[in-house]
Amino acid sequence: MSQFIEKLKKIRLVKGIVYAIVGVVSYPGLALINRLKISGTENINNLPRKNVLFVSNHQTYFADVITFLHIFCAVKWGKKNRLGIPYYLLNPFTSVYYVAAEETMRGSIISRFFTMAGALTVKRAWRPEGKEKLKGLDTSDTRKIQRALSENWVITFPQGTTKPFAPGRKGTALIIKQNRPVVIPVVIRGFWRAFNKKGLKLKKKGVLLSVTFKEPLQIDYNESTENILEKIMDAIEQSRKFMMKGPHLWKTAGSE
């Protein structure tokens, strides 16, 4: 069954249908019931069509990724820092995958369906109680991400958890060293206020959601994984220096 799903994910028409269904259902919660502020799309407008890695902080399981897919599709249709009317779902940008925990994507019928939008399922590096059990990605997971980067864009969340200011995973830095992609940092805010942890149910209305795409990171690929990871965590504003800006930034799980 899993091999069948893997084949389906590579069919552009199938991914397009999944995008359209998920996009229509999610659009009101992102752009009508709440307010979505997008900035920095000029930094993704002329990127190569492959070997681009988006690194972002993480606030919900699905709403974050769904929003990115909306934005990528809108940019493909010439939108600048806005979604507008979602006619872009008629011909979406599907050359993108996202890294997600294997058990999360098996959790429900909805998550299994969303897998076909381009999930790269990896083994979770953290136990449910929050204790680390793996220091890096499994080699098979690494190969999976490498193959995706060779032909597509990939979205990853270096922290691997929605908990704010959790440490980043070295696996992300290893992927960067091995594949030398263009790395685009992304900072999201407000999603934890608007949605539940899974990002599939509204928790509050009228919330300002923001997504900021920063300029590509200047990376020396020969640097140590520790230094590369430090740059990433600074860029997505999840390093210690950002945590120390004030308790209002970290006192609630999932806050900005």
Image (tube, rainbow, N blue to C red):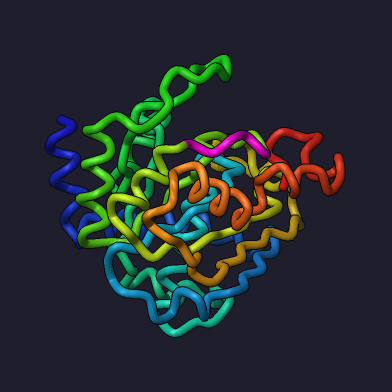
Q: Residue at x 47, y 51 (%)?
A: 65
Query: Who's the residue at 27% across and 61% down the image?
Result: 152
Q: Quadrant of the N terminus?
A: top left
Is residue 62 visible in this depiction of the protein? Answer: no
For residue 102, say whether it is visible. yes
Q: Residue furthest bottom?
A: 78
Q: Quadrant of residue 247?
A: top right
Q: Position of residue 2 (x, y in %)?
A: 18, 32
Magenta-colored stretch includes residue 112: no
Tell me which residue sits at (24%, 32%) in the image: 139
Locate residue 112, reporting x and y percent: 33, 35
Asked where in the image residue 137 lies, by quadrant, the reply is: top left
Residue at screen point 55% across, 77% down: 84
Looking at the picture, does residue 123 appear above or below residue 171?
Answer: above
> Between residues 46 and 183, which one lies in front from this camera angle?
183
Q: Position of residue 95 (x, y in %)?
A: 28, 63
The magenta-colored residue range is 165-169
| x and y percentages locating residue 117 in the rendered image | 32, 51
Q: In the rendered view, does 133 fall on the left or right side of 178?
A: right
Considering the whole magenta stretch, tell me its main secondary structure: loop
